[in-house]
Structure formats: C-alpha cells, structure tokens
Amino acid sequence: MESTVLRYRYRAYPDAKQRHALSRLFGCVRVAANDAIAARRAAYRAGQPYLKYSELSAALTRSKTTPERAYLSEVSAVPLQQAIADVDRGYRNFFAGLTGERQGPKMGPPKFRSRHDSRQSACFTRNARFAVSRTGDREAVVRLPKIGPVKLVMSRPLPSTPASVTVIREADGRTYVSFVVEVTEDAAPAAGRVCGIDPGLSSFATIVTSDTATGQEAIARIDTPKFLRSKARALARSQRALSRKEKGSKNRGKAKQRVAVLHRKVRQTRLDHAHRQAAKIIAGHDVIAVEDLNITGMARSNLARSVHDQAMGQFLRLITEKATRQGRTVVKVGRYYPSTQTCSSCRQITGPKGRGELRVRHWTCVECGVAHDRDVNAARNILTEGLRLLASASTQPTTPVDSRSLKTPAAHADGPPGLLETGEDQLTTLASVDEAGRTTGDRDDGVAA
C-alpha cells in the first residue's frame, strides 16, 4: 500500500452573507499577494537584496496597523499568509527555471492579481482550525474562520482528515471547496493483459490489447466526443451577445457568466469522459504503453481546435495517475518513434509519412503485402516498443519508463510474457504541484471514475 496526496473537490452553497464575506476575503488575498509582488519588484529595481518570505510576512503584519490596510485584520490571517507563500513559491519556481533546476517549460515571475480575474481563491491550512462535519447523507458543512459554516454537497466521503481547504469561486459564479487529503489504496489484482494506446483526432484513442497467457489480440476504438464543437454554436451566439453589451454594465456581467457556464459544461463533460475511459483502461491492463506526444506543437498547427477539444494531455495524465494508485505500469514511447510508418508485421518503415499523408487511414506494406489500418498499426507498434523498453529498463529504475532516457538500438522484438511483471520502479508519482505550489490530484467535483 502506498499513500498518495489528492484533492477532493465539492460544490459549496454559501448564503448571501457568506458570499459577501468570501468576496471580502478574496479581495484581501489579492491585496496581500499584490503587495508582496510590488515589494519584490521595488527591491529589485532599487538593487536591494532579495526579500525573503519572513520579511514579506512581517511587512504584511505591519501593514495591518496602517489606516490604508486596516481592513486586512477583518479576515482570517491564514489565507493572507498563504497568498504570500504562493508568491514566494512562484518566484522560486521562476528562478529555478532560469538556472535549470526546474524541469519543463520556463515560467515567468508572478503577476499582479485583479478583481476581474475569472477565478478567485483562498486557502485555509490546519492553522486556521477549519472543521468538516456531515449533516446528512450527502450534506455537510465546513466551518471557516470569520466565514461561518458553509454548506456543501459531499458526493463522496473524505478518506482522511484534510490538510487544507481552498475556497474557489469560478467565473460562472459557482463556489467550490477543495480539500487536500492523503489516500492509501491497495494495488489492483493482476489483469493478465497489456495494451498499446494510440491517441488521435479521427478517433479519441485506438487500443490494442494482448492477453499475456494466450497472446490473443483485441482491438477497441473510442469515438471522438467533440465536446467543444457540440457547443460551438451556442458559444458563438453567447459571445456575440457579450460583445454587444456595454463594458462595466450589469448586463455585460450576466452575459459573461452565461459564456462561462457553457465553457464549464464543456470542461466537466470532457473531464468526466477522460476519467471513465482512463479508469476502464487501468482496470483491465497490467502494462499500458502510450506515446509521448508533442501536444504543444500539435496545438500550434491548423488542427489546434481539434487538439484542444480532444484534451489528449489530460487523458494521458489521468492514465498515469490512476496507474500509479492501482499498481499498474505505464511505459512512455518516445515521440520520434515511427509508430505510424513502421509495418507491425515485417518491421519495415513503409507507411505514410508527414502531414502530407495524414489523410491516409489505410495502407498496404510494399515489403510484405499486409494491409494495415493506420491507427491499429500504430497502437500495435506502440505496444511492442513499450514492452521492449520495459525489458530494457528492468535493471534501471525509471519513473516512468521513457524511451528518450534509454540508449538502446533501434531493433524491435516482441517481449515474452515474463517481461510483463510490474514493479514500483516503473511507476509514476501522482501528486503534482501547480504554479502556486499547491498539490493537485486527479479527481474533480465528485466525478466518479
């Protein structure tokens, strides 16, 4: 058993008085964060040493005694200190990216927050002494300092005592509470199957499954949901209505909220679909081979709308996270591996190449004469390459298995069933950290997987 840090998010229903108190809290959190950013920038321009978190915290305490910032004493001090900690963590991530200590794309320095931002939040840690109690089968309340008991719908019980709670107000006006909890799960029983997944645009994913005992192969396709395109007409109509409203008017605020509601529906249905498909794949396979796609580059092409609508990065992330929690192995095949061009029968590169032949969905190998479906052939090759990488990395702890980190020849061979044993050294960690440094999980708003 291995413990994992997750976020459990629920819909909250504050009353009118609590909504007013939350609005005031969000405003104070913005002021505390903006004052910290302004102090850091002023010190930089003056050539002074870098201001530490302790100095920013002390400056916040002093500012409460001034007439201009006296209202900061009317709200809980914990979210204000957390806002400063987020700013400090954002600067540390920025500097770590400049020096190369932080992997991934470069991050910019923290920016000033605005009351017009579509998302407002405030975080309470255990120091705030918040409390959660059930009041019914699905009803519960969370008591927040200087806010009071806020009602929420607890669609699933909390697995452990939460370490913190974040109150979030989205652009569509809804309020959520997000708890950071520690979850301990047992490894799932062995399924006796492995699979290769080829995400795409013509179909959401093509899955080739192989039984480790008999070698029997099964092919499954997940149709493209087109969540955004199904709402495109309604979104265009609501956005045109928004553009006609006078800036600063109440009608413009209502029109903006209607647009946010449509985007929220697209976002939640897409996330629910990804959760369900990822859970089904993880439950039925011991080893999952996926392709390490360059989604950022794909989103810069003329297929950007379809790429964003598919949300392939979200789908692959959920597969990795769920596999970690259930003791499965995820193998990442390098993006430069020619899974589409390679014939899965004779291993010769004779398939369609480049974007010019992207519309070629079926082709016949000129070497062996075997006819291939483009997506099925790619998924079959991804599975074969994933098993080869897993065998090559069996003596090298790698998390997750990634072909870019292996110096192996380009030959391909089908791995025997003995190479399919899962090991913790090939598993990926679930807990991730967002730009503000808070831990994020894979569940959202009570969606069942």
Image: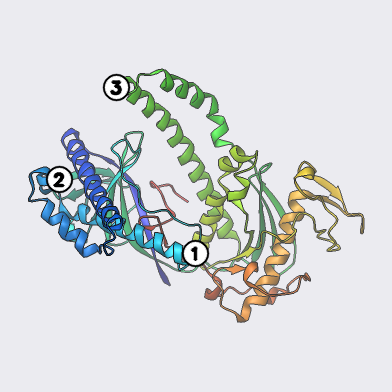
Q: Is residue 79 left or right of residue 423?
A: left
Q: Estimate the x, y position of residue 211 in percent, counting from the top left.
A: 70, 64
- Specify which label sits upstream in the sequence, 2 or 3: 2
Identify the residue shown where x is 52% and y is 56%.
317
Residue 146 position, x and y percent, is 13, 47
Is residue 120 rendered to the left or right of residue 57?
right
Query: For the residue marked with disc 2, what is the amino acid?
Result: Gly
Quadrant (top left/top right/bottom left/bottom right) for the N terminus = bottom left
**Dividing the picture into quarters, in which one does residue 268 lie?**
top left
Q: Which residue is drawn at 70% across and 62% down?
A: 383
Q: Is mark 2 on a helix, strand or loop?
A: strand
Q: Do the residues labelled 3 and 1 touch (CB within 8 Å)?
A: no
The amino acid sitting under disc 3 is: Lys
Disc marking residue 103: 1
Which SS class for mark 1?
loop
Give the secondary structure at mark 3.
helix
* Marks 1 and 2, the one that precedes in the sequence: 1
- Amino acid marked by disc 1: Gln
- In the image, 56: left or right of 227? left
Which of discs 3 and 1 lies nearer the camera? The answer is 1
- Callout 1: 10 Å neighbours few (<14), some, many (20+)? few
**For this rendering, which residue is in front, 429 or 300?**
300
Residue 119's image quarter? top left
> Where in the figure is residue 37, as x and y percent of width and height?
28, 52
The one of 256 and 247 positioned closer to us in this rendering: 247
* Residue 15 visible in the picture: yes
Q: Which numbered mark, 2 or 3, is in the foreground of this view?
A: 3
> Going 27% across and 65% down the picture, which residue do you hit?
49
Viewer-side label of 1, 2: 1
The residue at which mark 3 appears reads as: 250
What percent of the width, then of the height, locates residue 217?
A: 74, 59
